[in-house]
Image (cartoon, rainbow, N blue to C red):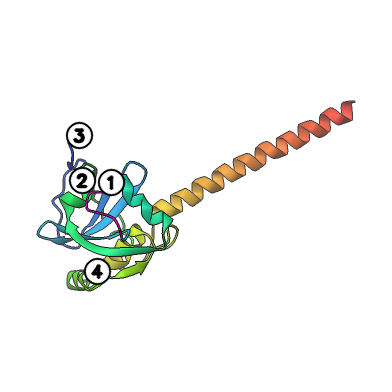
Amino acid sequence: MASGQTLKPWTEPKPGDLIEIFRPLYRHWAIYVGDGYVIHLAPPSEFAGAGAASIMSALTDKAIVKKELLCDVAGRDKYQVNNKHDSKYTPLPLSKIIQRAEELVGQEVHYKLTSENCEHFVNELRYGVARSDQVREAVKMAGIAGVGLAAMGLVGVMLSRNKKQKQ
């Protein structure tokens, strides 16, 4: 896909929509506020369209709420409208979503990859519920990997004991 194109099926963003941007190592999230602009979290030094550089948020505990053109924020990365929690949570009134987002622009906010990241931020604005499926998926995968490693360790211990008993 060419730079800045969205994933199919294409949905024209409407104010209040959540925008999922596919960075090389993770997904960045923003909220569409109209006229081509989004509001999102960025590290204090990030410039628009920084791509993978925006993962620098994970290395600091601060972020800046920025209002920038969606095309600049997405850069060459693909993006799509993704209001995936609309069936679970009722979106707040549009005027409240936009007002809350606009009031935060320019503010420095606490940032924590596991509990206060860009996905938490936009879900809080749209639904009043701060949640991140990326974090939930990572925790799940870490748990599965941990169980797998524990099982392998247990099998190793059992084989080792069995070998010692035969000697």
Identify whether 89 is placed above or below 79: below
Q: Would you say residue 90 is visible in this rendering?
A: no
Judge from the rendering whether residue 80 lies leftward or rightward of residue 117; answer left or right. left
Q: Residue at x 12, y 61 (%)?
A: 34
Q: Which residues are magenta?
A: 45-51
Which residue extends farthest top? 167
Q: Disc 4 designates what residue? A: 106
Instruction: Point out residue 149 in the picture as x, y percentages from the top left corner.
Output: 62, 40
- Mark linked to residue 75: 2
Q: Earlier in the sequence, mark 4 or mark 1?
A: 1
Q: Residue at x 13, y 51 (%)?
A: 12
Mark 2 burial class by Cα count in 10 Å: few <14, some 14-19, many 20+: some
Whether label 4 touches label 3, CB < 8 Å = no
Element assignment for label 3:
loop
Q: Earlier in the sequence, mark 4 or mark 2?
A: 2
Element assignment for label 1:
helix
Q: Residues under labels 3 and 2: Cα distance?
A: 13 Å
Q: Disc 1 designates what residue? A: 51
Q: Residues under labels 4 and 1: Cα distance?
A: 20 Å
Whether label 2 touches label 1, CB < 8 Å = yes
